[in-house]
Image (cartoon, rainbow, N blue to C red):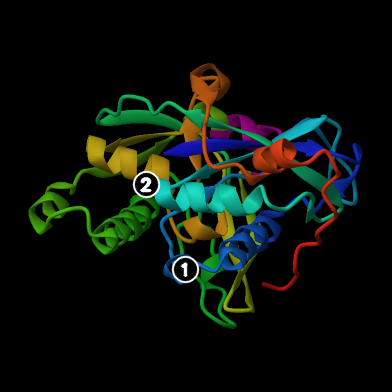
Amino acid sequence: MRVRIVFLLKNKGSFIPFHHQYLLAQLVKGVIVKGGREEYFDYEFYNFSGLKGQTKISRNGLHYYSTKVTLVLSSPNKDFIDYFLEELFKIPQVDIGNLYLTPLNVEKEQLPEFGESMTYICISPTVPLEPSFYDMEGKRFVSPESDHFSDRLYESTTARMEKIGKYTPEQLDSFFKFQVVPDQGYLNKIKESQKKFARIYPMYHQDVKYEVRGYTFPFTLYAAPEVQEFVFICGLGMFANKGFGMLDLANVDPSNRTEEYQFNNPAHEEKKETTYPTPNVKRQDGI
């Protein structure tokens, strides 16, 4: 399932680094650990987007000028989603970079009907290569038009599908069809305007900093419907649980397929029990 977490931005005009997935990864991991359920401390099958809102770019990074910002969170495990939301909504203020955010409400996205050909956009960068310590491999450019690009994404996808344990060996063997075909018109336009669709992003794993090359461009994926559903919910490529590889349907407004999501919201319960303001609770850093 996929949910859209809507935050109220308390300090409009504040900013976060342009490459901010690692800050969101720290937040998500911190909320997971804060709740104390150890079975989710090393859970990997979730994915999240960058922060979405009205932004302007400056030397400092992305400045947010909308009253509300949105984070998309996705996982095949509803219990994990509910656990994360319940713990998140216990925190009156979430600090991400220089943004002061208050969790406001949650919307559930209706999943599309998956076929063997789906056209996607990247709402967080997709990483095809795994880095190693003091190695340039993770930053190496791979042309998205090459078979090598598709092959790396195919290998990481099938490895994760095997690890999640929901598919039989016979099913996994049948998922051999997998091809990423980038939107050539988009790539040409980006090259002509001298902009970039592939950038270097910081990523932290077990307190070690790595640098990876992430790609953001529209593409068509040719694969079995089960594979399409898996990458749409669990992300495409490496480090999905670090906020990379989140996809959305191309040329579709996701707000047209959302509904309010009901979960055990501690913030609502507090409002029922008392009219006193909730005291400020600061999120622990470095988790």
Which picture quadrant has residue 12? top right
Q: How far across and down, in percent of the image, does residue 176 sit?
A: 18, 49
Query: What is the three-letter code of the residue carrying label 2?
Result: Pro
**Residue at 67% of width from left, 59% of height from top?**
27
| Position of residue 59 in the picture relative to residue 171 (left or right) | right
Residue 32 x %, y %? 56, 62
**Which element is circle 1 on?**
loop
Q: Is residue 27 magenta?
A: no
Q: Quadrant of residue 141?
A: bottom right
> Residue visible at 57% across and 63% down?
35
Which label sits in the foreground, 1 or 2? 2
Decide: few, some or many residues near mark 2? Use Cα within 10 Å; few <14, some 14-19, many ≥20.
some
Q: Looking at the rendering, in which quadrant would you find the C terminus?
A: bottom right
Which residue position is annotated with label 1?
A: 130
**Could you tell me which residue is drawn at 46 percent across and 65 percent down?**
40
Alpha carbon separation for disc pair 1 and 2: 24 Å
Nearer to me, 146 or 233: 233
> Is 164 left or right of 32, judged from the image as shown?
left
Circle 1 crowding by C-alpha within 10 Å: few under 14, some 14–19, many from 20 = some
Q: Which residue is mark 2?
A: 76
| Secondary structure beneath label 2 | loop
Q: Which residues are magenta?
A: 187-196
Residue 195: within the magenta? yes
